[in-house]
Image (cartoon, rainbow, N blue to C red):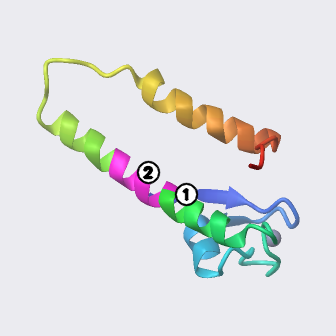
Amino acid sequence: MKIKGTCKRDGREFLVEQVIAAGGECPWDGEPFEADYAVVLVDALRDAQDAGARLVSALERIADVRPAFELDGSTVLGPLRAQLEKLERNVVARG
Ligand SMILES: [Zn+2]
């Protein structure tokens, strides 16, 4: 899964894999996206990308066997959307 983002400082788009490769820095301005939690950020970005790819692959396999049911898309996308909206509002609480 190729997750994209936009830097809040320079407004340029990047691929999450570029940020992972750069150790949590913006590939354009070279500044860390989060100075104090760079390792946490990079790990979470990697997990999001890997888990996203696994989720897509699992759904594809489910569809391939043509089961006698439908899945409620909102129960898959809803929790994802909720977290992305939280990120947009920038109100993620730090533990
Ligand atoms: Zn930037």
> How far apart are the alpha carbons under marks 2 and 1?
9 Å
In the figure, 52 relative to 84: above or below?
below
Q: Is residue 73 left or right of residue 31?
A: left
Please tell me which residue is depicted at 41% across the width and 24% down the height of the picture: 73
Which residue is identified by label 2? 52
Please tell me which residue is depicted at 56% across the width and 66% down the height of the picture: 43
Q: Is residue 71 left or right of residue 16?
A: left
Crowd tier of the residue under label 1, counting other residues whose Cα lies within 10 Å: few below 14, some 14–19, many 20 or above: few
Of pointers 2 and 1, the one earlier in the residue sequence: 1
Which residue is identified by label 1? 3
Total count of labels: 2
What percent of the width, then of the height, locates residue 46?
A: 52, 65
- Residue closest to the far front: 95
Assign ligand 1 to one image quadrant: bottom right
- Judge by depth and name the residue closer to the eye, 14 or 76: 76
- Judge by depth and name the residue closer to the eye, 59 or 40: 40
Crowd tier of the residue under label 2, counting other residues whose Cα lies within 10 Å: few below 14, some 14–19, many 20 or above: some
State the quadrant of the N terminus.
bottom left
Query: Given the image, on which type of amino acid does mark 1 rest?
Result: Ile
Please tell me which residue is depicted at 60% across the width and 66% down the height of the picture: 15
What percent of the width, then of the height, locates residue 27?
A: 71, 78
What percent of the width, then of the height, locates residue 79?
A: 54, 31
Q: Secondary structure at mark 1?
A: loop
In the figure, 58 relative to 35: above or below?
above
- Judge by depth and name the residue closer to the eye, 9 or 75: 75
Q: Magenta stretch containing residue 30, yes or no?
A: no
Please state the extent of the stretch shown in magenta in the rendering.
48-55
Mark 1 CB lies closer than 8 A to ligand 1: no
